[in-house]
Every structure is written in structure tokens, then in C-alpha cells.
Amino acid sequence: MRTAVKKLLRTIEGGDKSAMQAVFIETSSALDRAVRKGLIHKNKAARLKSRLSARIKAVAA
């Protein structure tokens, strides 16, 4: 899960919009899996996805 988030952050720094979207989908899936397994709370996953999405939108703008 943390690896997926770090991978997305590196992709955002790279600036490739299509890659950002693809990696964001993978990261969201990883966070959802972590919630189902009980590793993190669902609100934490939602907060992380929201913050990552905001970063993507800021770079894309």
C-alpha cells in the first residue's frame, strides 16, 4: 500500500498525465484492498485518495 502511494507521488513529480491516471487507479485499488483486509480505516483510505487526487488536479492544471 505505501509502495503504491510512493509510486504515484513519483509519477506526479514526473508530470505524465496519462501515467498519473493509470497509477492513481492502481493506488486506489491498493488502498481499497488494505481497507478490506483491515490494515487501515476506510476514512484514512478516503482521505489519502482525496489528497492524491487533489495533487493530480493541481499538476494537470
Image: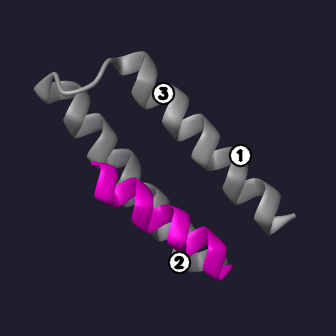
Say the numbered circle drawn on residue 46.
3
**Numbered circle sitting on residue 35:** none
Query: Residue 19 shows which numbered tag?
Result: 2
Q: Where is 17 relative to 53, above or below?
A: below
Cα distance between the residues tagged 3 and 2: 21 Å
| Residue 19 image point, x, y percent | 53, 77
Instruction: Report the residue at 59% width, 77% height from top.
Output: 18
Please give the range of residues in magenta. 1-16
Task: State which quadrant residue 61 falls in.
Answer: bottom right
Q: Is residue 13 within the magenta segment?
A: yes
Report the amino acid beneath label 1. Ala
Residue flagged by tag 2: what amino acid is it?
A: Ala
Q: Residue at x 30, y 59 (%)?
A: 3
Judged by its main secondary structure, the magenta piece is helix
Q: Between residues 16 and 3, which one lies in front from this camera angle?
A: 3
Query: Residue 54 bears which disc, if any?
Result: 1
Marks 3 and 1, the one that precedes in the sequence: 3
* SS of the residue under disc 3: helix
From this view, report whether residue 26 is shown above or below residue 30.
below
Estimate the x, y position of residue 38 in percent, counting from the top left.
Answer: 16, 22
Question: Which one is earlier in the sequence, the residue at label 3 or at label 2?
Answer: 2
